[in-house]
Each structure stands twice: as C-alpha cells, then as structure tokens.
Image (cartoon, grey):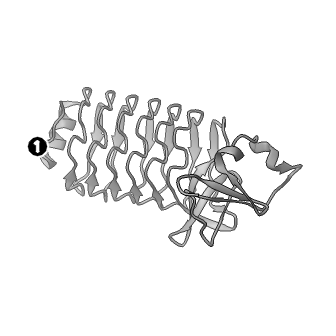
Amino acid sequence: MNGTEYVIWNDIVIERDILKLIEHRSFYGGSTRLSAIYTYRRGSLPSLANKLFEYEFSNELGGIILLDYFGEGDTHVDLPAYYDNHLVVGLRGTFYKNSSLISITIPDSVKSIGDDTFLECTSLSSITIPNSVVSIGEFVFARCYSLTSVALSDNLQDIGDHAFDHCRSLPNVVIPYGVTRIGRNAFSRCTSLADIVIPDSVTSIGRNAFLECIALSDSARQRILQIDPNTNFD
C-alpha cells in the first residue's frame, strides 16, 4: 500500500482516487449519512481511523485538526466548533486550492491555522481570524489573489513563512500586539499593500518578508526598517 491513499468503506479497502470518482452526495441516504467510511493516508493503517463526511481529520492537540474539506463548489463555509463529537482545535491544508471558496466563518475553538490551509483559494475575499488563534503557519493564505480584507487574532504570536505571499489585492494589514515574528516572505509580492501596522512586540522580520511590495508607503517602510535595517523591498 506504499505511496497510495486507501479508504476502508464498510470493511472494504478502496483506493482513495477511485472513491473520489463517486459523487459525494451518494453517501447520503435521505437525511442519514453512512457512518462507516474511514480513510488512511499513504498506505498506513492507524488504529484510529478518520471518518470521511464533509471533512477528513486527525486526532491531535486534545481535539481534532481538520485536514480536508469535500464540499466542492461551496462559496461559503461555516466551520463547526465540534465535529464527530470532538472539539475542532486546528486547521491544516483544509481548503488547499479550493477556488470556489469566497468567505468562511472560523469558530473560536480553533487555536492554530496550519500550513497550506487556504493556499491558492483564489476567490477568497475576506477573513476574520478569531482571537483563539495563536499561530498562522506557512503558506496559509499564499496566492489568495482576491483577498482584500484580513482581521487577525488579537492573541496571534507568530506569522509563518510565506503566510500571505502573492496576496496581490490586499491593501492593508494591522498586526496585533503580541506577534513577535513575521516569517520570511510573509507578505512578499503583495503588490497592493500600502500600509501595515507593526507593533513593538515584533522583534523579528524574516528575509524578503516584504519583497516586491511596491505600493508600501514611506512610513510603513520606515517602520519595517526600524525593526530590521536589512529588509529588502526590491
């Protein structure tokens, strides 16, 4: 089973790619969903299987991390605070390359937004990150070309590498007090970014964090250079 993802459906092992050929709606019987669909990644068969309904998930951090979303074509999603009777504490790669998603509501149970969660969600236009979130991973919003509004968590501590890379429609960002690090290439190629508020809590700005941010105001550039005189804007 190495190198292939398999699904156990009613005790039958099926290659995941084959299962995806079946319409997602075929798993509904009236208003009742099947309860015996399990997924195993890359040939491993862990003791705790992941039920496959709207989401693929894993048990981590005292709750569950949502790993994948199967509601293709949905333009708005209300993420659940509880899924399969477990608290949703994080996201990781959940909406990777979902070109339909325009908006989303994230519950305040979520503590972390991991790598690639919204990578290349090219229609996503705005997002509010609840105050429960303390970290944003790598490439979380990278290449979200339509993103024009971001409200960051008041309790955010870290902005990962390439987090907003190529968000070319984003005009401004307010980084909350408490963030200590802005990762490398975090806002690179945000060509519409004119203003960014950076609090005194930020002590580290990664390499090329604001590369090719051609619209940045002089005051924003000066603030960035106060923290890291070696910042490269070109």
| Kind of residue at disc 1 | Asn
Q: Quadrant of residue 40?
A: bottom right
Left or right position of 136 against 63: left
Give residue 66's quadrant in the image.
bottom right
Q: Residue at x 26, y 51 (%)?
A: 199
**Quarter of the picture holding the N terminus:** bottom right
Above or below 206: residue 75 = above
In the rendered structure, the answer to whether residue 110 lies left or right of residue 26 reads left
Residue at the image point whose x is 39% and y is 60% from the top = 155
Residue placed most toward the observer, 32 or 39? 39
219 lies left or right of 117: left
Q: Secondary structure at mark 1?
A: loop
Q: Which residue is mark 1?
A: 230
Between residue 193 and residue 137, name the one nearer to us. 137
Q: Residue at x 65, y 66 (%)?
A: 49
Q: Tell whether 129 sits left or right of 135.
A: right
* Position in image of residue 190 (x %, y %): 33, 32
